[in-house]
Image: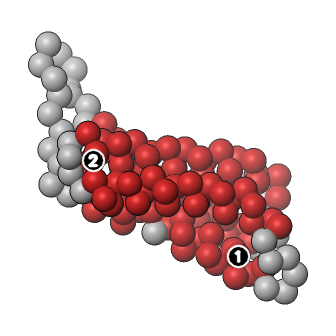
Amino acid sequence: MAADVNPSKTALNVMRALVVVQLVMGIALWMGRWNAIVDLHRTLGIAYVFALWFIAVLAISHKHKTGAAGFAIMWGVLIITLGFAQQTVLPGEFHWITRAAHLLIGISAMPMAEEMLKGVEWRAKSR
């Protein structure tokens, strides 16, 4: 008999892994290195946001921290929107502000996810 998989913890661990990978890739991109990985960075960013949304929907389905979950869903939209638009936001010498905002907005999703899962116990449905 296979062990029960806790989807909330799985999604959180996916986010934890992706935040590290995204930080490394983002800093490399910021420094002008690895420009060929922009599409991969975007794809993994979408996966990061999908994991955040999964956790938010799980919290809502448990009627747990629904306000925070709703905010996290909107925050995920902001992460993706800024991620895809950041090349055109404040170009020139002040573009670092856009990059820093994208970095902070992306990283801040991690404690949101952690907080939404506090107090939520996963119970696999018995067959």
Residue at the disc numbered 2: 59
The picture places residue 115, in percent across and down from the top left corner, at 28, 62
Name the spot of residue 87 as percent of width and height, x first.
81, 65
User: Mark 2 and mark 1 in contact (Cβ < 8 Å)?
Assistant: no
Q: Is residue 94 left or right of residue 51?
A: right
Instruction: Work out whether residue 15 can be spotted.
Output: no
In screen coordinates, is 114 left or right of 88? left
**Residue 105: image x %, image y %?**
54, 69
Neighbourhood count class around disc 2 (C-alpha, 10 Å): few under 14, some 14–19, many 20 upward: many
For mark 1, does the 10 Å Cα neighbourhood hold few (<14), some (14 to 19), or many (20 or more) residues?
some
- What residue would you read off at disc 1? 98
Between residue 72 and residue 20, name the one nearer to us: 72
Mark 2 residue type: Ala
Total numbered labels placed on residues in the image: 2
* Quarter assignment of residue 94: bottom right
Residue at disc 2, secondary structure: helix
Looking at the image, is mark 1 or mark 2 earlier in the sequence?
2
Judged from this view, the residue extending furthest toward the right is: 92
Distance from label 1 to label 2 (Cα)? 31 Å
Question: Please, is residue 125 above or below residue 91 in the view?
Answer: above
> Which residue in the rendered view is the most extreme toward the bottom?
93
- Residue at (68%, 50%) from the top-left corner? 42
Q: Which mark is residue 16?
A: none
Instruction: Indicate left or right for 71 with 35 as reference.
Output: left
In this picture the colour scheme is: secondary structure
Residue displayed at 20% across by 46% down? 63
Residue at (54, 64) in percent of width and height: 106
**Does residue 101 appear in this view?**
yes
Which quadrant, please, contains the C terminus?
top left
When asked about the image quadrant of residue 89, the answer is bottom right
